[in-house]
Image (tube, rainbow, N blue to C red):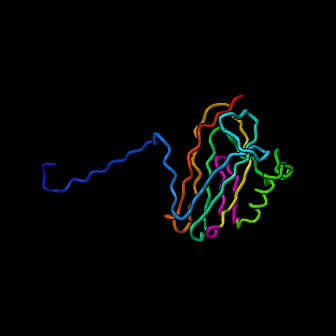
């Protein structure tokens, strides 16, 4: 700029991180556990197309958060099994004791809204101070391949600095 007027510059950049961000907690905390339909821990690196997994999310808060929004993005190889459908292809009603215990804990939670979307599980819940909230949903391995697993997230809808990002999972590997 050889003139005497200011020159304004704008730069836009976009991209993807090379690695997943570290887990972060501020008032809220979220953990994801992957279980088989029998309630036992299951690894995501040994699924076959058609296998069902139970995803257990546990949300905690150090303050009362009446407006928490939980978002769990699905990796490309999984699809949600909507438990609200009357004629769904899978049900947790006949599952073992551990799964029934998780379902009972979920029924005790103050769930205001729940959605089984194409690419994510979403729930609006009230999280009381030091009272964990349990959320569970079924997902089916459908498309063979190797996929990165997104981190679960939770944040207060009206106090956005109260948020948490869960730990990164290993790769999801679906075999035919």
- Which quadrant is home to the C terminus? top right
Residue displayed at 63% across by 37% down: 172
Give the residue at x 72% y 65%.
109
Quarter of the figure with residue 131: bottom right
| Pick the front one: 21 or 13 | 21
Left or right for 82, reference 59 = right
| Res 47 → quadrant | top right
Query: Residue 163: x percent and y percent?
Result: 53, 61
Between residue 51 and residue 87, name the one nearer to us.
51
Magenta span = 111-130
Task: Please tell me in which quadrant of the rendered image residue 46 appears.
Answer: top right
Side of 162 relative to 70 (left or right): left
x, y percentage for residue 96? 83, 49
Is residue 132 covered in magenta? no
95 is higher (above) or lower (below) than 131: above
Q: Position of residue 157 (x, y in %)?
A: 56, 65
Q: Residue furthest top?
A: 176
Q: Is residue 5 left or right of residue 134?
A: left
Residue 141: horizontal and vertical position, in percent?
71, 38
Q: Nearer the viewer, residue 78 or 104?
A: 104
Question: Does the magenta stretch mainly form a helix, a strand or a loop?
Answer: strand
Q: Residue at x 42, y 44 (%)?
A: 14
Does the magenta-highlighted stretch encompass residue 114?
Answer: yes
């Amino acid at each position: 700029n050889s003139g005497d007027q200011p020159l304004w510059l704008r730069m836009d950049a976009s991209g993807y991180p090379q690695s997943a961000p570290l887990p972060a907690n501020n008032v809220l905390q979220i953990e994801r556990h992957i279980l088989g339909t029998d309630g036992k821990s299951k690894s995501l690196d040994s699924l076959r197309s058609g296998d069902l997994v139970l995803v257990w999310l546990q949300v905690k808060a150090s303050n009362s958060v009446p407006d928490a929004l939980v978002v769990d993005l699905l990796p490309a190889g999984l699809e949600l099994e909507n438990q609200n459908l009357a004629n769904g292809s899978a049900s947790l009603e006949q599952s073992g004791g551990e799964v029934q215990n998780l379902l009972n804990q979920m029924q005790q939670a103050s769930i205001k809204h729940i959605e089984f979307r194409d690419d994510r599980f979403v729930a609006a819940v009230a999280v009381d101070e030091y009272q964990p909230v349990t959320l569970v949903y079924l997902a089916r391995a459908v498309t063979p391949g190797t996929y990165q697993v997104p981190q679960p997230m939770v944040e207060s809808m009206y106090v956005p600095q109260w948020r948490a990002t869960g730990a990164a999972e290993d790769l999801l590997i679906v075999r035919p």
